[in-house]
Image: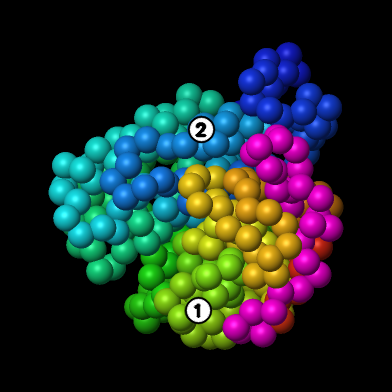
Amino acid sequence: MLLSRRQVLQLVVGTGLSAAVLPLHAARRAALRIGLISDLNSSYGSTSYIPAVQQGLDQLIALQPDLVVCAGDMVAGQKRGLSGQQLDAMWRGFETAVLQRLQRAGIPLLPAIGNHDGSPGFPADRAAVRRFWTPLRSRIGLKLVDASQFPFRYTVLQDGIFWLVWDASSARVPEDQLAWAQQQLASAAARAARARFIVGHLPLVGVGQGKDRPGEVLDRGGALQSLMENGRVQAYISGHHHAWFSGRRGQLDLIQLGALGSGPRRLLDGGAPAQQTFTLLEIDGGRSAIREITYAVATGQPLAWSMLPARLNTRAGLLQRNSSERLLRG
């Protein structure tokens, strides 16, 4: 999707984005632009979204991403007693408030399933996920490679980038899914791609206050990291902790997204205030480089990279802050 400068400026009105910031990014079409969002939901059973979600979507759409990735918690399930009708109503609310807005803008959506969307211990929630997403599989603009278990796990080759989405809606990624991931990363499509990314809801390392504990991060983090590094994965993109941190562990980028919806959290160090955010990746294949920019929804402005602590002292050890611009692994 490529809009004229005038169309871009028209989109700015009412979004909160600075007109001085927006045209700079909107004019740079040499780079592939990926929008990253996560944790949109509100209270249990809610069929609507707080104003920050709509405001953040307006801002992101105005930046003209080629793809939007959502790292989960699109709806507010995982509560005993919610009926099938209530679950379906939540997904219809998501379709109206989020999916259709992206579709009208011509932007594909790549979703991952979060614990509040379809946790393994909630079969009714998972059934509702299938009812909603299965008919949409061919209508959300994705060039699917393996969609046999969509949307819980699947792969996509989009604009030369290989995306693997796995079911990290709980702390344990099953063995059969790990074997599948290894096969997918070894495939011809993955090897030929400019870069490879994995998306899941729970993170590899805890970053949010009150969340760095068992059950809130993925089990067997070291083994998962080795799988990704061996598959030459650029980054693992996750949500769940409602706090943005861009880290580096070994050869792997860890992009841990803030919440666009309710309940943003502070980082473990307690420094920066909790706030709704979304992230933009600019992938420049010509320079073999990637640039990460995170925006505060309240101001529509990019956050200063220096606001991130240089390292976080996590339960899994020190997590170093990444560079805002880095090389693609290729």
Q: Position of residue 229 (x, y in %)?
A: 63, 77
Q: Position of residue 320 (x, y in %)?
A: 75, 74
Residue that mark 1 sits on:
213
Q: Nearer the viewer, residue 165 or 296?
A: 296
Relative side of 64 to 90, left or right? right
| Amino acid of disc 1 | Arg
- Start-end of magenta stretch: 292-317
Q: Nearer the viewer, residue 15 or 145?
A: 15
Q: Residue at x 49, y 74 (%)?
A: 217
Quarter of the rendering occupied by the C terminus: bottom right
Q: Nearer the viewer, residue 138 or 169?
A: 169
Relative side of 4 to 95, left or right? right
Q: Residue at x 81, y 70 (%)?
A: 310
Image quadrant assignment for residue 321: bottom right
Marking on residue 19: none
Residue 151 in view? yes
Residue 326 in view? no
Q: Position of residue 167 (x, y in %)?
A: 39, 65
Residue that mark 2 sits on:
51
Relative side of 165 to 277, left or right? left
Q: Residue at x 38, y 70 (%)?
A: 170
Q: Is residue 310 covered in magenta? A: yes
Quarter of the rendering occupied by the N terminus: top right
